[in-house]
Image (tube, rainbow, N blue to C red):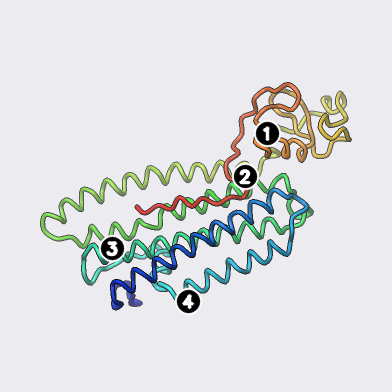
Amino acid sequence: MSGNGRVVLNLNPLLEVYSVTVLFIGMQAAFSIFNCIVKKQVSCWDERNLRSVIATFLLLCLIVYSVHRFFFGHLILQSLSFTTYSFDELSLWTVFVVVYAIGITDYVISYVAMATKCVVIALPRACLSFERRGRFFQFIESLYQLYQFLIPLPLWISFVSDSTGLYWFIGGVLGSLYVIWKLFETYHKLCKCKAFFKSILQHSPYGSRPSYERMQEEQTCPICLDNFSNPVEIPCMHIFCEECVTRWFDTGKNTCPICMARVAYSREWRDGSTSNNFPWF
């Protein structure tokens, strides 16, 4: 891979396939392990193991650096910066190798996302309350998925642009449809990012802050049976401590602990998990 953005393949094709495949399998295995570690530490709340969190963060950073240093460094930087490609030889083999490298780039982005979540997990309660962490995980994940979704765009635009003759016309039509689809999906992902960002600024995703009059009527939380701490009034008018009701909903329940009325809220990605649904197109 040359520095001017042109794809040049000098390795033996079989050696190229072997090395990239081994790397791909290794990164998938590491992704699964780190994803489980992050989810486990998130579920521990204030009993999280800071040594494990810090070690995970350092290992993720080391892997990202190693992949960039020894495998497809220029191509990864091109993908991350949305640089267009120019193919010396337009063939399915060329696209195969570049797409494989795009997949590795997706893993690099996912590792960065998990490392960012490790930073959030390690923050003390004084900086970020544990009940608010889930909203930060949702926002980080939405940004990661948006960025990941846009990574393959320069590859396929460059591929159809380098076509000639009749293939140029067909490529132009397919490229136009592809861009329209990408714009449509990008809009929806941007809306999701905006919604998760707004939820960070809200008092609570489950309800609102109760009025002074309501607080005079109820002074103890029905869950912990103690005085309210950062009270939240959910839509059915019952009041709980934010931490108590967050723990309740984080177990997978979507109803009020008292009256079992349904509470609408987004639970996806609150557990700190990272998606591995990598887009190839």
Q: Residue at x 30, y 66 (%)?
A: 85
Q: Position of residue 167 (x, y in %)?
A: 15, 55
- Packing grade of label 2 (10 A; few <14, some 14-19, many >=20) is many
Q: Amino acid at mark 2?
A: Arg
Report helix, strand or loop for mark 2. loop
In the image, taking residue 5 as reference, residue 122 lies left or right, namely right
In the image, taking residue 201 as reference, residue 77 lies left or right, namely left
Q: Residue at x 62, y 45 (%)?
A: 270
Q: Indicate which disc, 4 or 3, sits on the residue closer to the N terminus.
A: 4
Q: Are marks 4 and 2 in contact (CB under 8 Å)?
A: no
How far is disc 4 from disc 3 in space, using C-alphas?
Answer: 22 Å
Q: Residue at x 43, y 69 (%)?
A: 77
Q: Indicate which disc, 4 or 2, sits on the residue closer to the N terminus.
A: 4
Q: Amino acid at mark 3?
A: Val
Q: Quadrant of the N terminus?
A: bottom left
* Residue on which disc 1 sits: 206
Nearer-the-camera pick, 270 or 189 = 270
- Packing grade of label 4 (10 A; few <14, some 14-19, many >=20) is few
* Residue on which disc 3 sits: 95
* Residue on which disc 4 sits: 69
- Packing grade of label 1 (10 A; few <14, some 14-19, many >=20) is many
Q: Amino acid at mark 1?
A: Tyr
* Residue on which disc 2 sits: 270
Q: Position of residue 124 (x, y in %)?
A: 76, 57
How far is disc 3 from disc 2 in space, using C-alphas?
Answer: 36 Å
Q: Position of residue 224 (x, y in %)?
A: 84, 35
